[in-house]
Image (cartoon, helix red, strand yellow):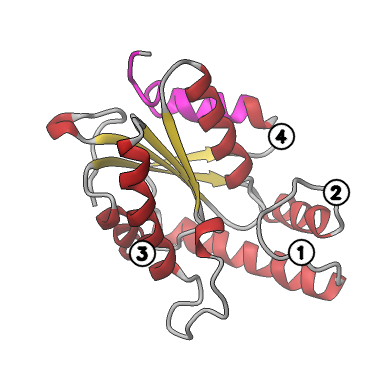
């Protein structure tokens, strides 16, 4: 997996910012806001939500997150974006270990990948999972969320476990507290902490 300082274009590599984190932490909302901020500044940007390019279910037993499909689709989409003039790439999607992250990075070898993990405590994740499931959160691509409180409780428990796993692996290049911040403010904070990402002139 390519690493290095944010915006490092050595060898012609393109800045690639990947927002990851547990379910409910706000990856998609923040990723899209960063995309919006960048392209509105005059820099042509591309955005991929891995959940959108991975809607092929049921997933195989050995790849419950459908990461192979998502990574392959990323590799297919990126050259089209690049040919259209994209100068940087923003993506949002969950990943739990470096080996899986490397699978995605290998699909876009001309990029300089920076992984930013969004963090929130267990109570905040539970609140967000229930709010989304009950139709009080942002619209998320894919099948409609379950309104069953039992299923939502199970999803919240999984989000807590995922957050704990990410605490142990610590493979992200950057970790940003996503609690108690509006999406726009959080997007600006991520970019600032990532070295004024993407570090390109408009």
The mark found on residue 100 in the picture is 3
Disc 4 vs disc 3: which is toward the camera? 3
Nearest to the observer: residue 168 or residue 135: 135
Q: CA distance from mark 1 to mark 4?
A: 23 Å
Please provide percent x and percent y for residue 174: 41, 40
Name the residue beneath numbered marker 2: 136
> Between disc 2 and disc 4, whose residue precedes?
2
Nearest to the observer: residue 69 or residue 169: 69
Against 81, residue 33 (above or below) is: above
Q: CA distance from mark 4 to mark 3?
A: 29 Å
> How busy is the neighbourhood of tag 3: few (under 14 within 10 Å), some, or many (20 plus)?
some
Left or right of residue 12: residue 42: right
Q: In terms of image quadrants, where is residue 29?
A: top right
Asked if disc 2 and disc 1 are in contact, CB closer than 8 Å, the reply is: no
Q: CA distance from mark 3 to mark 1?
A: 25 Å
Please provide percent x and percent y for residue 94: 51, 57
Name the residue beneath numbered marker 4: 180
Disc 2 vs disc 4: which is toward the camera? 2
Against 143, residue 45 (above or below) is: above
Q: In which quadrant will I find the C terminus? A: top left
Left or right of residue 112: residue 73: right
Q: CA distance from mark 3 to mark 2?
A: 32 Å
Q: Residue at x 23, y 29 (%)?
A: 8
> Between disc 2 and disc 1, whose residue precedes?
2
Name the residue beneath numbered marker 1: 145
Asked if disc 3 and disc 2 are in contact, CB closer than 8 Å, the reply is: no
> Between disc 3 and disc 2, whose residue precedes?
3
- Where are the magenta residues, as a range? 185-201
């Amino acid at each position: 997996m390519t690493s290095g300082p944010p915006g490092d274009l050595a060898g012609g590599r393109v800045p690639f910012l990947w927002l990851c984190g547990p379910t409910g932490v706000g990856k998609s909302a923040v990723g899209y806001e960063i995309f919006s901020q960048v392209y509105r500044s005059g820099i042509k940007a591309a955005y991929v939500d891995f959940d959108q390019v991975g809607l092929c279910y049921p997933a195989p037993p050995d790849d419950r997150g459908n990461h192979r499909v998502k990574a392959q689709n990323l590799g297919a989409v990126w050259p089209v974006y690049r040919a259209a003039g994209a100068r940087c790439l923003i993506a949002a999607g969950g990943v739990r270990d470096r080996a899986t992250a490397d699978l995605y990075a290998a699909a876009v070898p001309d990029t300089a990948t920076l992984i930013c993990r969004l963090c929130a405590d267990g109570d905040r994740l539970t609140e967000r999972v229930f709010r989304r499931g009950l139709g009080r959160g942002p619209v998320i691509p894919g099948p409609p969320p379950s309104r069953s409180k039992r299923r939502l409780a199970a999803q919240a428990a999984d989000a807590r476990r995922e957050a704990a796993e990410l605490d142990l692996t610590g493979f992200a290049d950057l970790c940003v507290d996503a609690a108690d911040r509006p999406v726009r403010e959080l997007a600006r904070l991520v970019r600032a902490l990532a070295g004024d990402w993407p570090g390109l002139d408009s």
